[in-house]
Image: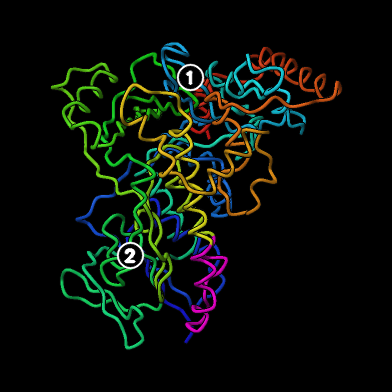
Amino acid sequence: MKIKRIAIIGGGTAGWLAANHLGAELVADNEIEITVIESADVPTIGVGEGTVPYIMNGLKRFGISEAELILSCEVTFKQGIKFVNWLDAEKHGGDHYYYHPFDAPYPAGFDVSPYWVSHASNLPFDYVGIQSRICELGLTPKKVSSEQYSGLLNYAYHFNALKFARLLAKNAQNRFRVVHKIATITGAERDDDGYVANLVTDTGDRLTFDFYVDCSGFSSVIIDKELCVPFISKANELLIDTALVQQVPIAEGEALNPYTTATAHQAGWIWDIPLTSRRGTGFVYSSKYMDYETAVNRYSDYLNVPRDSLSPRKIPMEVGYRKEFWCKNCVALGLAQGFVEPLEATSILVADFSAELLVRNFPRYRGDIDVLMPQYNKTITYVWDRVIDFIKLHYLISDRVDSSFWLDNKNLNSVSDVLKERLAIWSLRPPQKADFFSRFELFGAENFLYVLYGMKYNTRTMILSAGEINRGRTLIEENKILVERSSSVLLKQKEWLHKLTAAASRA
């Protein structure tokens, strides 16, 4: 039986990303019809507002222009994450920070990390590149004349998640003939082989398709409620379980930072994402170590607003992933697939990657499913395990000892064997690309280098030749010159966005 009718249950970012990926891959086959089914009664979470550069791959493939994205989704550029107070304040001073930027820590293609470890650790590690200092200057990663999806430095975006989903929806319908249906799915019925035969709506209607993509968020109406695929909790590894979310206005004259800020507190951290019209903020914490009232009080202190004026949306977060992501003729994506806290913009990244992997392995016939499904599940399981390792790293190597939360995060029983082995190796020498042997690691050596050494991880001094020492020193000194010249080449973010808006209004 050829798979012709595909249903995506749930819209939001994950659902419409899936629709565009499937549409771009299958549009040439006129027999295939893709339908996104959204409920008018179930709001989307709408807080995934930060991305990583990987998002550009899909946007270009979908045919979405960068200008349209920026102008329609309240976009600002993101060049990395500024981590504030993730180390002990007494040892490193109050408001200590480091950057995890998007520029690779290999100036001129040379790995300077051995030189930094041995001869330059008095400098912030992110000085091996220039992007952290570009961020501090508030500059954009691209010139006004730069081609779309291209800049002098790597970058991603902050955006209004609801508007981004609408942009994806418009593109999927107009470019790929995706059908949009409003209905609330309450369940499903299966055939004699256990495959999903049809969906059941709250009005009793039955909607029949050949293949189903569950993007129904935490409710997971098909993968969980009908197919009963178990959820594997990772709450013993990542202790965060709650987020309080509040949007705040951008003050007049306030700069638009070209980065996300992640500020640690006694039981978690706070995200702060600038959009053109507002700041998206979230107070992330573990309810085991901080009660709700204390969290709200700390949140109001951070935002510098009276406690009575704060009415945050509370989002419980169950950390973990499905035992299987593809079961029978159903694949789960987005929050239906799994969840970890949004520390490194992992939610959209994993959903985007998983959707792309699905379309590259999409079954054209029902008999293909049993062949393709095991490898897909194995791959996405590996992706999730390594993503969890990377998030865990931020807590594990912190030297904060001011609360039980930070102390308990150092418990080695909550660390995977893979991460333990890698950290042991990296105590002897810096991470190398060869340590990440799978192409399915979404975070590689460059990401780990910035976090490890931004947080003062101790690696044994290396034995280097005079040539390696001179090369490393020269490259870091040249970075200083590049930073000094940057203001004559790059604009402040507000000015760049204003020029784009002005040009669009004249067009």
For residue 304: magenta? no
Along the line of sight, which residue is nearer the eye, 248 or 238? 238
Along the line of sight, which residue is nearer the eye, 211 or 110? 110
At 41% from the left and 76% from the top, the residue drawn is 328
Q: Secondary structure at mark 1?
A: strand
Q: Secondary structure at mark 2?
A: loop
Where, by quadrant of the figure, is residue 323 drawn? Answer: bottom left
Gap in angstroms between the C-alphas marked 2 and 1: 39 Å
At 46% from the left and 13% from the top, the residue drawn is 91
Residue identifier under label 1: 97
- Is 270 situated above or below 329? above
Q: Residue furthest left?
A: 308
> Which disc is residue 146 wearing?
none
Along the line of sight, which residue is nearer the eye, 109 or 169? 109
Question: Which amino acid lies under the numbered mark 1 shown in the image of this protein?
Answer: Tyr
Residue identifier under label 2: 230
- The span shown in magenta is 357-378
Question: Which amino acid lies under the numbered mark 2 shown in the image of this protein?
Answer: Pro
Q: Position of residue 296 (x, y in %)?
A: 20, 27
Magenta span: predominant SS is helix
